Image (cartoon, helix red, strand yellow):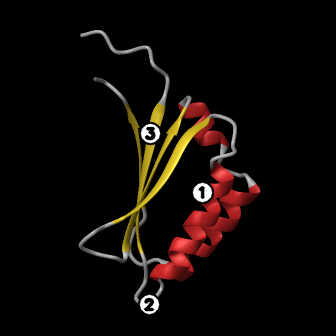
Amino acid sequence: MDMPTDTRVRSVSRLVASPGKQEELRTLLERAGAAIRTMPGCISWHLMVNTRHAAEFVVVAEWVSEEAYRARIGTPEWIETTGQLPDVTTGEIHHDLFRLIA
């Protein structure tokens, strides 16, 4: 089976706010998203909240390539955001990268 030559990737991150920290996490993610949307290679960035569990957030971003996705690591915005996550999240933060196949 031939694989598509499309280099775009989608990153999916799942985060759960610590009790009473939903608004802080939302604000932190919205601020990060505003910066990420302007980064080279970012096609789109979306923040979602679970309709049944208001403390659960998912971030889905589309990037022109895996290299563009990885290039955001180490930027001041990335360092600032990831440094604050332990104060407002609970449990493991899940990050996955997907490539469109159909």
Q: Quadrant of the rendered structure where residue 50 is? A: bottom left
Which tag, 1 or 3, sits closer to the chain's start?
3
Q: Say whether residue 38 is left or right of residue 98.
A: right
Q: Which residue is mark 1?
A: 33
Q: Which residue is mark 2?
A: 20
Which tag, 1 or 2, sits closer to the chain's start?
2
Label 3 sits on what residue type?
Arg
Q: Which mark is residue 10?
A: 3
Q: Say which of 41 and 84 sits in front.
A: 41
Label 1 sits on what residue type?
Gly
What is the x, y in percent for residue 40? 69, 36
What is the x, y in percent for residue 83? 64, 70
Give the farthest residue toward the top.
2
Mark 2 residue element: loop
**Which residue is painted at 50% across and 81% down in the image?**
23
Mark 3 residue element: strand
